[in-house]
Every structure is written in C-alpha cells, then in structure tokens.
Amino acid sequence: MNPLLEVHDIHTYIGQFHILQGVSLTVPEGSVTALLGRNGAGKTTTLKSILGLTPPRSGKIIFAGREIQGLRPYEIASLGIGYVPEHRAIFTNLTVEENLRIAERRKGELKRKADFIFSLFPDLKKLYKLPAGNLSGGQQQMLAIARALVPDNRLLLIDEPSEGLAPLLVRELMSAIRQLSSEVTILLVDQNFQMTSSLATYYTLIDDGRLISSGLMSELLKEPETVRRYLGAVV
C-alpha cells in the first residue's frame, strides 16, 4: 500500500522537556494503524505534532506526498486530516446538530454526509436536536468521531476513543470504526490493546518518546513478551 502519512525522526519539546526523541511511523492509505505505548509514552504528543499543535523542532511529516511540518494547524486540517481528541472536546451546550454543523469547512457538507454518519451512529439521528451535554459518554464519543467525518478528510487521528466506556459500548464503537475504515484511513491510539489489535492491520510501538518497533499487527501478536513488557497486556 502507498503511505498516506509518513513521520520521519521527529523531535518534539514541550517547554524544556524533550517528549518525542526520534519517532517515526508510516500509515498506509486505506488502513487502520495503531500507535501503541503505555501512558506517558508520547502517543498524544505524536498526534499533536502531526497536526502542528505541538510542532516538532526537527524531522519531517509528509501527508499525501507533501511536507506539512511547519504549517499551522488549520492549514494541516484543511488538507484532509481530522482529529478526534482524547476527552472528546464536544460543545455540551450546543445540540448534536450544531456540534456537527460547526465542523463544516464548506456549506452543505453535513447534509451530504448525514446518511453515512447516521448509518454508523444511529443514536445521533434520534438525539439530533438535544444538547450534547445530555448524551451518555458513549454517545458523546460517537459525536466526537462523527464531527470529524463532516469534512472530506482522508485521514482520521483518533485518540483514546474507548476511554471510560463500558464493554458493550466499546464493542459498538469497534464496529463503527471497522465500518469507517472502509472509507477513510485511520491512525488509532487506545490503551485497550484487545480493541486496537483486532482493528489495526499495522502498528507502531513507542516508549518514553522513542520508537521501539513497527510493522504488521499480526507479527506483533506473535511476540507476547514485547506486548507484556511495553503495554502490560496479555496476548
């Protein structure tokens, strides 16, 4: 597969702290790629570096053949990268409809995407006119993902979508992401290794801001000691 996103040896600082120390990854087009690591490994900082929210001091980030490091976040987003942040960041005082409408880059995008969004998340159609603050945690997560689907994004960066969700809701979310992956390329961060390993074809594993390994998820699953050591999970 052709790479849609390539990250080459990026070094990112937050204040005086050297958070990412040479992280590289590749996201093939049409795939789900998991970015793995313990809490504090640098996963969210990697996503924010891609988006220009915490710009790397060195290294290259290439999206669809174009170098994007140094661009402003809104310029990067306009190229077709959507972001579903950790903790959802929805507007609780706005309705579901209003949360989706403000994600439009061009007038009419929501109308054009509505059927697809509601096929993935039918609850949102029923709750369309309700304030987002009235939604359950799982429904708010669905809204956060749906909001990133309104514009014509080629790549979605999804950060910790299963956090705080009950197992039944995690399964529903997995089903939606699996369907979504047929339409858009996904870079997924989540502590739930069972979920990410079942969804992702490729992986990149980082620890303490450094690259450990990357490749096919099927190969990582053959290395239970690596999974236990760096993720605290059991294959």
Image (cartoon, rainbow, N blue to C red):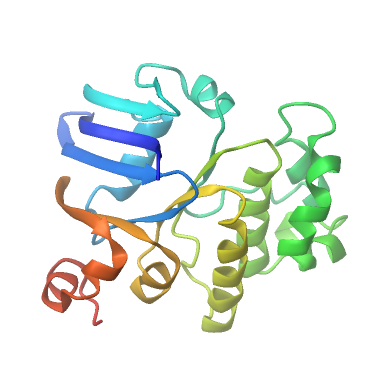
Res 95 visible: no
> Quadrant where the C terminus lies?
bottom left
- Count numbered badges in the picture: 0
> Looking at the picture, how far across and down is residue 127, in whole percent?
83, 62
* Figure quadrant of residue 141: bottom right
> Looking at the picture, how far across and down is residue 61, in whole percent?
32, 28
> Quadrant where the N terminus lies?
top left
* Figure quadrant of residue 175: bottom right
Is 25 located above or below residue 68 in the figure? below
Instruction: Give the residue at x 70% y 36%.
Output: 103
Instruction: Give the residue at x 52% y 19%.
Output: 75
Residue 182 or residue 137, whichever sits in front: 182
Is 77 located above or below residue 154 in the figure? above
Left or right? Give the position of 161 relative to 211: right
Outermost residue to the front: 1
Res 125 visible: yes
Instruction: Give the residue at x 53% y 80%.
Output: 166
> Looking at the picture, how far across and down is residue 73, in whole percent?
48, 24
Left or right? Give the position of 230 relative to 88: left
> Looking at the picture, how far across and down is residue 72, in whole percent?
46, 18
* Figure quadrant of residue 216: bottom left
Left or right? Give the position of 90 relative to 135: left
